[in-house]
Image: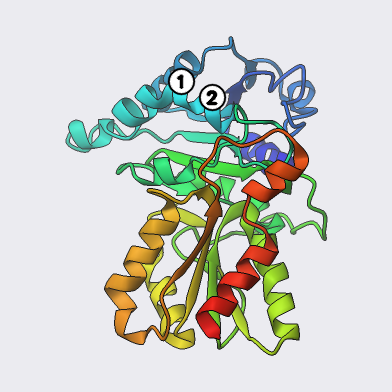
Amino acid sequence: MREALRQALRADDRVFLMGEDVGRYGGCFGVSLGLLEEFGPERVRDTPLSESAFVGAGIGAALAGMRPIVEIMTVNFSLLALDQILNNAATLLHMSGGQLPVPLVIRMTTGAGRQLAAQHSHSLEGWYAHIPGIRVLAPATLEDARHMLAPALADPDPVLIFEHGSLYNASGEAPPPGGSVDLDHAAVRRSGTDISLITHGGSLPKALAAADELAAEGISAEVIDLRTLRPLDGEAIATSVAHTHRAVVVDEAWRTGSLAAEVSARIAEQTFYELDAPVERVCSAEVPMPYARRLEEAALPQSADIVAAAHRAVD
C-alpha cells in the first residue's frame, strides 16, 4: 500500500494524502510511514479528529480538480462521515446532470481478528456497497493492494478501498511496479469443480485454507475473490456456480442484511436451476465483536466453518 501511495504521489501533482496521523506518525498502521519526509506537509496532511470535516474537505478538493486520497483510520469512524459520503460524494455527479464528478479515493481499515473489541472490529463494506454512485474495493492479495490505487484514482466516481487489518502483515514476493488490476471483474483464486467458495478481503485466506482441507478429502473447491463489491461481478459468480452447482458465501459481516445475502440472492436469481444444494452462508455471529481472543475467534468465520458448510452442500 505504501508503494502504491508513493507511486501515485510521484505520478501526479494533484494527488495528496490526508487523514488522522497519516503524516508525522506514519499512519495508525504504518502504511504512510516516510511519505511526509519525502513529499512534505502540503501533500501528506495530518487532519483534526473530525471525519466529517476532512472527508468533506476531500470532496471539495476533488470538485476543484485535485485527486485526494482520504484515509479514515478504521471503518467505524467512517460512520461520522456517512453524510458526506452518501449525500455529497455519491450524489453530486447525478444531481448536477454530470457536471460535478467527485474523483475521490477513501481508504479505511476494516475487519476483526485483532482484539480491538466492538468499537474497531466492524466489517461494513456491505453497507457502502448498497450506495449507488460509488465504487467499493476490497483488496485481498499483495497484487491488488499494490495496484488497485492507480485505477481508483483514475475513476471519475468516488472509490472506497477497504483494507482488512489482518492482511497488513501478509508477506510474499513484491508485485512489480507498473502492473495493473481489473476493477470490473472478480478473480478465480483457485479452480475447482465441486463447490464454489465466494468471498472477499480478509476472508480469502480462510477460504483458500478451507479449499486445501477439502482437497485433502477429495472435494474440489473453486475460490472466487469478489475484489469489487460495488458493482458486483454477477457474471463471474453465475459462471462459477453453473460450473460447480454448489456455493458457500463467506462474509465477515453480520449475516442479516449482509453482502452475503446479496450474493446469495443473485445466485438464486441467475443460477437457481443449476444448484444441486441450497446456498450456504458463513458469516460472523450476530453480536458486537468480543474483545477476548477465544470469544472473538468463535464469533468470526473460520476455515473449519467454511469446510463444514461445504460438507453440508456436497454430502
The residue at the point 74 percent across, 35 percent down is: 292
Q: Is residue 292 left or right of residue 12?
A: right
Between 187 and 283, the one nearer to me in the picture: 283
Q: What's the CA distance linking mark 1 and mark 2?
A: 6 Å
Q: Amino acid at mark 1?
A: Leu
Indicate the quadrant containing the N terminus: top left, top right, bottom left or bottom right.
Answer: top right
> Are the two marked residues, 1 and 2, in contact with CB atoms closer than 8 angstroms?
yes
Mark 1 Cα shell of 10 Å, populated few (<14), some (14-19), many (≥20): some
The residue at the point 70 percent across, 61 percent down is: 205
Mark 2 Cα shell of 10 Å, populated few (<14), some (14-19), many (≥20): some
- Mark seen at residue 80: 1
Q: From where the camera sits, is residue 147 visible? A: no
Q: Is residue 177 left or right of residue 253?
A: right
Q: Position of residue 165 (x, y in %)?
A: 69, 41
Give above or below for 239 relative to 288: below
Q: From where the camera sits, is residue 175 visible? A: yes
Residue behind mark 2? 77
Q: How is the image coloured?
A: rainbow
Q: How many marks?
A: 2
